[in-house]
Amino acid sequence: MSESHSVSSEPLLTLYYSLGAGLNNSICLDLLSVLNSLMDVQVQGISKGAAEALAAGFELLYPDAVDRQKVLYDHLKSHSSIPYKMDEGKYALISRLLLNHGYYDTIVSLLPVRGDDISDISVASNLLTSLFRLVVRENKAMLQRGAATHSHVKTNLHVAATQLLTAHLLHTVTSILKKVSEPPCEERRIFERSTRARVG
């Protein structure tokens, strides 16, 4: 028998940050183990509650962006092989993580856009590839069915994935434009010296 409960992430997030430095590595590992175990419980309210708790403290429980990328990538890979059911905690986790990071000001905590911010480019590349495949696969399936029948973003992984990819693309383009519009420091100094010489 399954139960459905709505879990707000705000109190959970407040709790995580109130603990602050008290969340050492040992406590984080224990908490992660418990939450991951609870997501496998065959009671909808418990599994989804665990997913919401993990998503709320995602950056604190996984301080390294590469680890966050690996977690999401691993779940997307598993979902691609054997699709998670929509009432599963793992499905709720993927959905929540995609939604949480699908904005211009939150995408960089998952996928930094500058090369020097990415310690393992292969992990980020794998994650982006998985997201693109998810979007293509789901849209293709909808076209084959004739129409998009699901409208709620929280139950549409491909919609949330599209939003995340769009945010990442926007951030990447903005970063490139800023870099192009600003000449390198050495070139700027040469330009300024030559300008002063001509004026003088």
Image (cartoon, rainbow, N blue to C red):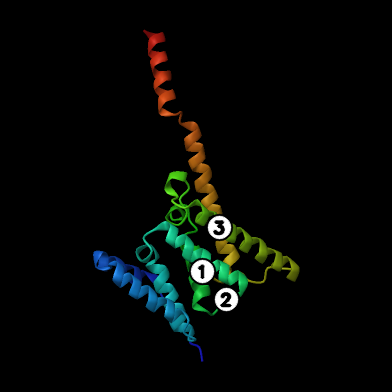
The residue located at (26%, 65%) in the rendering is: 20
- Label 3: element kind: helix
* Lower sequence index among marks 2 and 3: 2
Depth check: 105 or 132 in front?
Answer: 132
Q: Residue at (58%, 61%) from the top-left corner? A: 130
Please report contact status of discs 1 and 3: CB closer than 8 Å, yes or no.
Answer: no
Does residue 6 appear in the picture of this structure? no
Q: Residues within 10 Å of mark 3 (few under 14, many from 20)?
A: some
Q: Secondary structure at mark 2?
A: loop
| Residue identifier under label 3 | 126
**Mark 1 or mark 2, earlier in chain:** 2
The quadrant holding residue 62 is bottom left
Residue that carries the numbered disc 2 in the rendered image: 84
Residue 181 x/y as whole percent: 49, 32
The residue at which mark 1 appears reads as 94
Q: Nearer the viewer, mark 1 or mark 3?
A: 3
Sequence-wise, which precedes: disc 1 or disc 3?
A: 1
Three-letter residue code for mark 2: Tyr
Residue 81, which numbered label? Answer: none
Marks 1 and 2, Cα distance to the nearest angstrom?
A: 10 Å
On the image, the x and y values in percent for residue 86 come to 56, 77
Camera-nearest residue between 25 and 11: 25
Residue at image position (44%, 23%) is 187
**Cα–Cα gap, marks 2 and 3:** 20 Å
| Crowd rating for badge 1 (residues with CA inside 10 Å; few <14, some 14–19, many 20+) | many
Q: Amino acid at mark 1?
A: Ile
The quadrant the C terminus occupies is: top left
Q: CA distance from mark 1 to mark 3?
A: 16 Å
